[in-house]
Amino acid sequence: MRDIQGFVSDYIKGKKHLHLEIGIVTKEDIEYHSFGNPPKQNIVAPEHRLFEIGSLTKVFTSMLLLELEHQQRLSADDTASKYIHLGKNDYLKKITLKHLATHTSGLPRLAPNLSSKKNRYNPYSRYTEQDLLAFLADADYTEQIGKFEYSNTGMGLLGYILCKVTDRTYDDLLKKYITTPLHMMETAALLNTEQNSRLVNGHTSTGKVMPHWDLNGVHDGAGAIKSSVHDMSLFVQANLNEEHPLASAMQQSHVPIRIGESELYFGWQEDTALDQNILWHNGGTFGATSYLAINKEQGVGVVLLSNYCFGSADRVDEYLDAIYKFLTKKDLYPLTFLEPVGKDLLEFVMRNH
């Protein structure tokens, strides 16, 4: 086992309710590390605790698109209007499923008619299919098509369309095409009773417990999945290998495609580490953060799951922090991000692999 305490020491500081689970993955092996303050009575092994993985879900949604395309159920070049019938809206005739999967549809991060005031701590829970269709009925972002703009709305719409095409729920699609073939039995959009008992409480950076998010079906494709570091490590390992049922779709997702003036990926973001290409994604809810990255050249990857979010969901905390910082020149609630920890850890693995 590698000694990685130094990589996480700053991140775990001050988080008295923390569960931080890490998977270090190669083509042949998975190594788990756990940090934080788990209650003594907790009998669940750390690698089997479940977390909200937030926007890491988007990688799975893009994978579902590619897998369904391989099975000739649809094409990534199909327009949204083929599946969303809203009369004369020409904009939906111009954007494709490929645009949705690469955040180039022009759709905004959040639909203008999604108001968090309805449920501040669970902001997607009351946004319905009717709300989505009402927004799309006269949506027109034609001028932005082909330009990258990260969009929960777009990826949620993609998941919604995949469900319509197959007449299945997002959770059913996930099980049929990804989690069952890869033996990821702890990964789901809808948890059963036993799985729910292993779902850890999420916290803001101030330590407040936050409710788990309900994406209400409409945004499932953008962020509904819950998983364990055990399962997410299996997912990373599958991305590094080529002998499993999803290999073709996964390998396709690793190859950039030209859209507008950019080279983009289905679901993934691109970066470099030690002058080598890496593919990564992160995720966040009001009570959890996640990070996943792979380096295909060396066949290594990392997964980090935390039950603390990036910041605070409460404006009172923000005001208190601002006042404290003004008086003391220090942060009352210092924000520590998971991505730098994950990238540093991946570079460490790359150097020592």
Image (cartoon, rainbow, N blue to C red):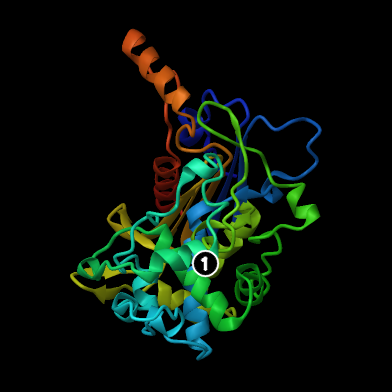
Q: In this view, does 121 lie above or below 319?
A: below
Residue 189, position as x, y percentages in the image: 63, 60
Q: Is residue 139 visible?
A: yes
Residue 89, position as x, y percentages in the image: 33, 77
Residue 101, position as x, y percentages in the image: 40, 70
> Which residue occupies the extreme top position in the image?
327
Q: In this view, does 7 lie above or below 289?
A: above
Q: Is residue 296 visible?
A: no
- Nearest the eye: 311 or 164: 164
Q: Is residue 112 left or right of residue 291?
A: left
The residue shown at (34%, 69%) is 138
The residue shown at (40%, 78%) is 80
- Nearest the eye: 227 or 74: 74
What is the crowding at mark 1: few (fewer than 14 residues within 10 Å), some, or many (at least 20)?
many
Q: What secondary structure is found at the residue carrying circle 1?
A: helix
- Nearest the eye: 280 or 326: 326
> Which residue occupies the extreme bottom position in the image?
72
Q: In which quarter of the image is the N terminus?
A: top right
**Residue with the mark numbered 1:** 60
- Nearest the eye: 113 or 331: 113
Q: How many numbered marks are there?
A: 1
The residue shown at (44%, 76%) is 251
Tag 1: amino acid: Phe
Splitting the image into 4 quarters, where does residue 212 fall? Answer: top right
Residue 70, position as x, y percentages in the image: 49, 87
